[in-house]
Image (cartoon, helix red, strand yellow):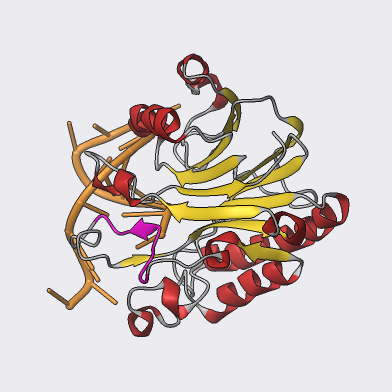
Amino acid sequence: MKIATWNVNSLKVRLSQVLDWLAVNQPDVLCLQETKLQDENFPIAEIAAAGYQTICTGQRTYNGVALLSKQAGAEIVAAIPGLDDPQKRVLSAIYDDVRIICIYVPNGQSVDSEKYQYKLKWLAALNGWLRDMLNKHRKLVVLGDFNIAPEERDVHDPALWEGQVLFSLPEREAFREILGLGLRDSFRLFDQPEKSYTWWDYRMMAFRRNRGLRIDHILVSHELAKICTACIIDKATRKLERPSDHAPVMMELRTGC
DNA sequence: ATGGCCTTTATCAAAGGA
């Protein structure tokens, strides 16, 4: 079972790239963030023609998440219970017997902003929800754009980023606490190339210079970590014309189907 | 050096992203 995540930074702009990527990589489930589409404008027909079903929850201009899958998802959840949040950042369903939770964590803007406080509050609510979900689902995947680089090796220039949003200690601590609930960072279950990142700024030729951050993650419960066989970042999409600033991340499980 | 680039929108300037 192949499960992937990709912040596409507007599905309207990136639809042809997503369809190409599905055809080449054949994931069972692809989780999208920053679709920036209201549900009535979602390209369900084009995605169906490519052999994928859609579950989406979107809003105009900002945010928006979706699940594209070969098989139908069940028991859909589209918000963190108990968190009053109009922003569309969460979507979850069960595929086969795996509970998949797609998230788009708030960016935070800067550590002295209200958006940063919202980010920390959002992460605390996510933590509480994941604790409940892990109690109910031994086979659980949490993936998406976390907007957090967990460790120094996930940042091209840790000294430059020290204390900055995406790498500040409170954010990294929130990430660590989520792992502490009983999740593993699937990317780090395997040997990986040094300086592996998932996001590069559009400016300053950041991709060409590999000045990036690893902020998109696929976390797996301990039961799934035992059958996880690979996790890769697909940098090829970042070289396309009009790329998303994020690359897809894909993980594979040795499952029965 | 506080910019740079990309996307969206009640557009031709500003906000948000990361």
Residue drawn at (78%, 39%) of the image: A97
Q: Residue furthest bottom?
A: A159
Task: Indicate whether A90 appears above or below A47.
Answer: below
- Looking at the image, residue A199 sits to the left or right of residue B11; the answer is right
Q: Is residue A2 above or below residue A173?
A: above
Q: Can residue A164 be seen in this view?
A: no
Quadrant occupied by the N terminus of chain A: top right
Q: Is the magenta stretch mostly helix, strand or loop?
A: loop
The picture places residue A242, in percent across and down from the top left corner, at 25, 39
Residue A195 colored in magenta in the image? yes
- Kindly identify the residue that appears in the image at 58 percent across and 47 percent down: A252
Horizontal side of A104 relative to A157 (left or right) equals: right
Whole-percent x, y for residue A186 in the image: 59, 60
Question: Residue A212 lies in what quarter of the image?
Answer: bottom left
Q: Where is residue A31 in the image (x, y as percent from the top left)?
A: 55, 40
Task: Judge left or right: residue A123 versus residue A149.
Answer: right
Q: In the image, is residue A152 part of the stretch drawn in magenta?
A: no
Q: Quadrant of residue A135?
A: bottom right
Between residue A132 and residue A140, name the one nearer to us: A140
Above/below status of A51 relative to A138: above
Magenta-highlighted residues: A194-202
* x then y, percent, for residue A87: 60, 45
| Residue A208 seen in the current view | yes
Q: Residue at x 69, y 33 (%)?
A: A257
Which residue is painted at 74% across and 34% down in the image?
A: A96
**Which residue sits furthest right?**
A136
